[in-house]
Amino acid sequence: MAEVGFYHLTRTGPDVALPALLGRTLAAGQRALVLCGSAERVQALDRTLWEAARPDWLPHGSARTGHAALQPIWLAPASDGPVAAGEAPNGARFLFLIDGVEAAAEGWDRVFDLFDGGDEPALAAARRRWAAVRAAGHAATYWKQGESGWVKG
């Protein structure tokens, strides 16, 4: 079963929170697939990751840049279709979901579901995803942005 972490964004958006989480993923020797809400969002996130100050190096790619097997972080729009564990273009075992994207947790080592705490529909959707993850028997954890980092709830 996958370990699914729900990350309640209350102080920043995903563009600020995601680089630190991806940096930790790379430091742990893992690869990541980030599923975004649209192709335009992939392009914006591409810029964000190149310009991130902390960590200052987040090597990544997307369909636009190619060479998926060489990319430790792969950015893709969810509209490209569902990606099952073991089928990530870059061989990732960690899945990051932003922009309300939903995907099955089966087969992934870890899933990171980042959601906007200031958006009531996003909160309601995250609660539904939480219930589905728990019902499927996955280990679910809840994290909320605190004053100086993530606080486990």
Image (spheres, grey):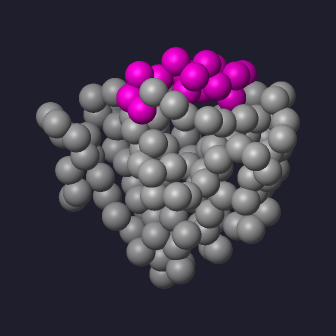
Q: Nearer the viewer, residue 6 or 96?
A: 96
Residue 73 found in image quarter: top right
Residue 66: image location, x then y, percent: 84, 36
Helix, strand or loop: magenta stretch: helix
Give the number of callouts.
Answer: 0
Nearer the observer, 81 or 57: 57
Q: Which quadrant holds residue 93? A: bottom right
| Residue displayed at 74% across by 68% down | 86
Q: Position of residue 39 (x, y in %)?
A: 75, 28
Q: Read off the magenta span.
A: 40-55
Residue 118 coordinates in the image, percent (x, y): 34, 30
The answer to if 46 sits in the magenta stretch is yes
Q: Is residue 41 visible?
A: no
- Residue pictured at 46% horizontal, 64% vertical: 4
Q: List x then y, in percent, for residue 35.
A: 65, 44
Based on the picture, tell me whether residue 151 belongs to the magenta stretch: no
Residue 8 shows in the view: yes
Q: Locate the C terminus by quadrant.
A: bottom left
12 sits to left or right of 100: left
Q: Residue furthest left?
A: 147
Q: Residue at x 42, y 32 (%)?
A: 55
**Against 8, is 37 above or below?**
above
Residue at image point 48% right, 76% down: 138
In-image side of 48 versus 74 (left or right): left
